[in-house]
Structures are given as C-alpha cells and as structure tokens.
Image (cartoon, rainbow, N blue to C red):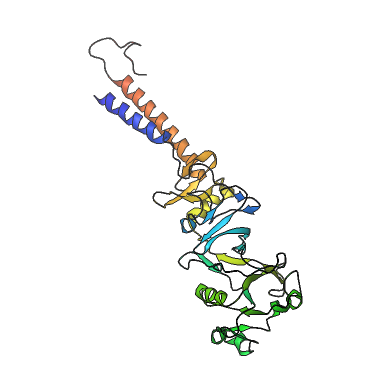
Amino acid sequence: MEMRLHLHALAILLVVSARPTSVAGGLCRDSCGDVPVRYPLGIDDGCGSPYYRNMLTCADNTTLRLRTPSGTYPVSGADYADPHLVVTDPSMWTCARPFTSVHAAPFSLDTSTRFSLSPRNDHLFFNCDEERVIVAPRPAICDRYPDRCDSACDSAGYLCRNLPGCRGALEEGNMSCCAYRPRAAESLRAMLRHCEAYTTVYWRAVGDKFPPYDQVPDYGVRVDFEIPVTTRCLQCQDRRRGANGTCGFDPATRDFVCICDGGRDSTTDCAATVVFSISAAIGIGGLVMYIRKLRSSKVVTCGVQSNENRFF
C-alpha cells in the first residue's frame, strides 16, 4: 500500500512537469510588411498588452491596419522609442492625388483606449463655406490660450502656404485653406460637413538635438500610445538573464504570460521555465532514489524477492 502511494506521487509529478502550455497559439509575429510590431502592440491574439487587443490587423502579412470607430486605416510606420504610429487616411487630400470633394468621415479614435491623437497633428480644411465656418487669421493670443480659439479656422496657417511636397499648389488651384485644431472628433466631422476636403499633417522628428526645430511636416496622422511597464514583462525580455521572451497574455483570462521560443509559455520568464524543468527532473530523481532506499531496507517476511516482482 505504501509503495502504491509513492508510485501515485511519482506519476503526478511526471504529469505536472511534462504538461505543455500554449497561450498565444505559437510565436508572436514581430512585423507586418515593413512595420515592426513590438510590445505593447500585437497582431496575434495573446501577444502584446491586452489593452491593445484586436486593435491591429495584418491579414495579408503586408499591410498593418488600425481599427477605429471611423474605419480601418493603413499604418505606415511605428516608433517605440517615442511611442507612436503613423496612420494614413485614404480619404485625405495630398499633393500626389488630384483634388476631389470628400464626404467620408474623418479619422477618429476611441477615447476609451490607450491610443490618443498627438498634439503634433495639424488639420487642414479646403474650400470651406465661410457662411458656416469662421475662416480668419489666427490671433496671437490663440498661441497662449488655444481653448479660446477653437471655433476659428486659421486662414494664415503656416502649412497652408507650405504644404509638404507642393508649396504654392493651393494658389495655383485657386483653393482656400485654413488650419484647425479640434477639441474632439465631433469637431472634425462638423468641419468636414462645410468643407470640400481635408488633410492631416504631422510633424516628423528628423533629429533629437534641437527640438522642436528638428521637425519637418509630413502627411499622415500621428497616433500616440502608452507602453505599460511591468516588472514581469521586463524580466521576460531581459536577455542578460537568458530570458529572451516575448510579453503576452492569456486570451481567456488576460493574465500575463511570457512567450518563449518553441511556443513554450511561462508565468514568469523563459529562464524560469528552464529552471523549473531541471528542478522537476531533480525532484523525480530524488523520489526514485528514496523509493529504492525504502524498498531495499524493507524486510521480506514471505515470498521471494526476484526480478519479476521488483519495482526497480
């Protein structure tokens, strides 16, 4: 009876130590086309932070797309040192396309997410109905108190005279332009109802020595995102400890998971997974030695102990 209990304990230990786990269903893709995908973002369920779950797609493995309430938009770039995405709205006017009236909803974000519109974005509207929209040069006081000038569209905006890639194109096309800084997405939608087209220009950094003077305008919408920093994620990614894992989460519980090479998952880090396996092997070996010692010290009072009825 005692020997049977020891065998049950050994079987349970073997099952626990050998139990495979797979949270993310495989390794996490680290790019989509030319755009890198790293923590906290992810395109495979269970990868990255749960705060950004199902917000990015890469169905064709070539174009990263961001889901928003106003639609799904291509992502042309991602930066993780200065966390932001650059999103392209196909309905926006640029120098590379002929001018046409656009009646699609302007780009907007869900304010309940960890994404936010960057203050480096400037929205330009073209051929607005001046009976419905206040189009006037922006007073100097607006630079100091921008909240007081939300209803006006600046006809003297710098970018209206210096559009990226086609300076002076508006004068040649006899198009009016004004720059607008909305408080919310509703303001953009209201503006577009009274203007023929719009575009968004963000200020792209080209250096880090003289900000903000080392920025140049470029077409696109800059979308900032937060990077949740946790001790477990830092340990999971720590190459110095031999961890070299990818931070993820359990899709069922949203609990943290460290995804290791070969699809192995750990609740701590990949180095701990290896240590656990070694510890399990040592534990099994110790249990086997203990049972052997117990068996050899037991006095046989009846029957003959032979190779046929020996357990080990």
The correct choice, above or below, for 293 with respect to 222 in the image is above
Lateral position of residue 79 relative to residue 44, left or right: right
Instruction: Using the image as rendered, state which of residue 10 and residue 249 is in the foreground.
Output: 249
Q: Is residue 121 visible?
A: no
**Residue in view at x 23 percent, y 14 percent:** 301
Instruction: Using the image as rendered, state which of residue 108 and residue 276 is in the foreground.
Output: 108
Q: Is residue 245 visible?
A: yes
**Residue in view at x 62 percent, y 72 percent:** 198
**Residue in view at x 65 percent, y 70 percent:** 201
Lateral position of residue 249 relative to residue 4, left or right: right
Image quadrant of residue 2? top left
Image quadrant of residue 286? top left
Q: Which quadrant of the figure contains the C terminus? A: top left
The correct choice, above or below, for 298 with respect to 218 in the image is above
Rendering coords of residue 1 (x, y %):
24, 24
Rendering coords of residue 258 (x, y %):
49, 48
The correct choice, above or below, for 182 with respect to 106 in the image is below
Rendering coords of residue 177 (x, y %):
67, 79
Instruction: Using the image as rendered, state which of residue 15 and residue 74 is in the foreground.
Output: 74
